[in-house]
Image (cartoon, coloured by chain):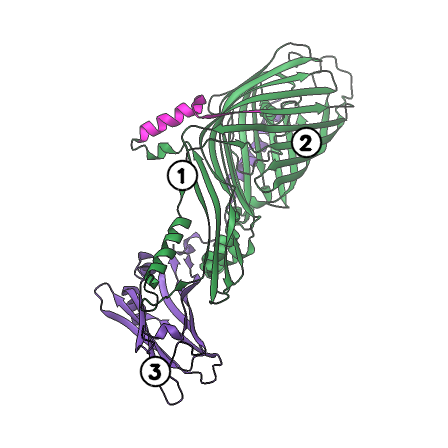
Amino acid sequence: MGVFVSLHAQNKQLLYGFKDVPQQILLNPGAQVDHRGYIGVPLLSHIHFNAGITGFSAFDVFADDGKDFNQKIRDVVYNMDAKDFFGFNQQLDIFSAGFRVNTSLEKFVFISFGLYQESDVFSYFPKDYAVLAYEGNFNNLNRRFDLGQLNVSAEVLSVFHLGVNKKINSKWTVGFRGKIYSSIAQLSSTENNGAFTTEQGTNSFLNHIFDLDMKLQTSGLSFLDEPNASEGIGILKKRLLFGGNLGLGIDLGFTHQPSPEWTIDASLQDIGFINYSKDVKNYILNGYLEYDGIQSVFPQVVSDQTAQDYWDEVKNDFDELFKVDSTTTAYTKWRPIKLNSSVSYNFGKKIEKECNCLDKSDPTFQNRVGAHLFAMKRPNHLQWALSAFYYRKLFKGLQLKTTYTVDAYSFKNVGLGMSAAVGAVQFYIMADNLLDYQNLAKSQSVSLQLGFNYIFKNNEN
Amino acid sequence: MKNRFFKKKYLALIIVLVVCFSCIKDTDFDQATPITLTPIMEVNLVEIQETSPSFLDSSGTEMPFISDLIVLDVLSSDFFNDNLIKAELVFQVTNSLNKAFQIKMDFYDLADMLQHSFSIDIDNSPSHTFLVTEHTEVFEAMSLAALKASIKLDITITLVSNATSSVLTDDSDGSIALTSKGIFYLEFTQ
């Protein structure tokens, strides 16, 4: 049985490599598996939320410090830059299960599969838009307001996946997972260019340059126009089960254990794409205009044109400039690819003082330390996180993992995870950014996940 | 065994408690007053460039004035009505004609009623040097309301003769140029 609740950016450093938790295989299809199988309860086997923001925390704005609220917002805006971002990710497992195909402990194949729903929202902070909104172009002569800073994407999709994990020998385990994506709704505006600039004019005070090359792509949003809510939900349900815009992807991974003490592993997730062809609506804003005023021509002088004609012309130019064209052209987007990799060292075998043939105590290493790297492709940058971790088996059915993570959100992220098994039912809980729990308002990201699994253990256990 | 089981439970309980009793301190979420943005937009407005023939009729004699009319429906748009809190119209006139002028700006509403009017006096330039005259018209309170009610701008350039000025002919030296910009103080409250 499984219940997951989590808040953080997509890095799951606590779950990655946590062998006692079956869901770790979703992060690395080539992870080592030491159970015969598992079943997750439908809709409850993996509930996961995470959110993070760089540049400020709620405390910066809502601190009870007597400062003017508008001034604090302004300070936050001016302290942030166009590299700051906001990210939200949510996953819900609809079903998941896995089983071992043959029974040899040395060589086996482990099949896992499931269907999960995912939401992902990501946006950079459009600093120049904010400055323009705060100041206008006054006192900003020659400043190029970069319209390309608008970079936002949001998507809800479902993913059916089937993974094959093969333990080749005691040193190598490899695996891959095939994925079919079904996008329920998607919108993105990530390919914007252009600028708004006000310059000193040659024969006039000012010359305004509008250079617009902007695009918003959407698919699957027509349900919003559906007047009947239940029909709208019906459409969404159908899309959840392969009725949306489809795509394909794979995850790849391996674990290498050159010696019993050392482990090296790595995985790539979501090497894939979605082709958006159904229910597509794109909006395009494209144009260039230099405006340096309305020429007054005085009709008495030149009879065929008045200032009014000139003004009408200018108005038409502006109407043309800001005219939004819409198309239904299909488009393809790559999934945000994710890399996980870790190196770890096992130590501290448990040794019974007296030989006891009936003793079923664990002969494996009790401790593990290592370093873990996470990286994820974002539209304009690589989001990364580096963790140091320590894993400890306290008892046979109780394991702990603690992590210290450095990433774009924080340099003081301490996480703690625990897995406990009572019979076949395994329970685990993982929390991230523990130091911030003293005052959540100061946190720029929070993470929490917990769950239950029904695990078929090795016969030998 | 029982002891171990309790230990596990105890540990899980601690973690759950940490999570549940985490808190939000020293904050006041009620202070979220509406956010006010006050951008100032600077926009180029009317440009005028005239030489002496512009002020002469077909027979080559001076006209008393020339005028032009612009329908500026932007001024009375909802956008300006709702968000404009102050406006400044800045004019710069450069005259090198040996003729004085009065440039008059009349703002009319939809019913052709005069809402606001001002004029700029321009000296003549006997030696045809560039004489620069600047004028800033500030619209606040009553005059701002008048500006918002306006839809038409009538520009009249009246020729003014004085002791040192000369009569304009087709080949009089110099020119008169007007450049203008609007500085619009906006306020958005969300």
- The residue at which mark 2 appears reads as A341
Q: Which chain is purple?
A: B
Residue A341 visible, this angle: yes
* First in residue order: circle 2 vs circle 1: 1
Q: Chain of mark 1?
A: A
Label of residue A411 in the image: none
Rendering quarter of residue A168: top right
Image location (x, y in percent) of residue A76:
52, 55
Q: Which residues are magenta?
A: A229-249
Viewer-side residue, A388 vs B42: B42
Question: Mark 2 falls within which chain?
Answer: A
Is residue B161 inside the magenta stretch? no
Please tell me whether mark 2 sits on a helix, a strand or a loop.
Answer: strand
Q: Nearer the viewer, residue A232 or B175?
A: B175
Task: Give the quarter of the figure containing the C terminus of chain A.
Answer: top right
Circle 1 is placed at which residue position? Answer: A326
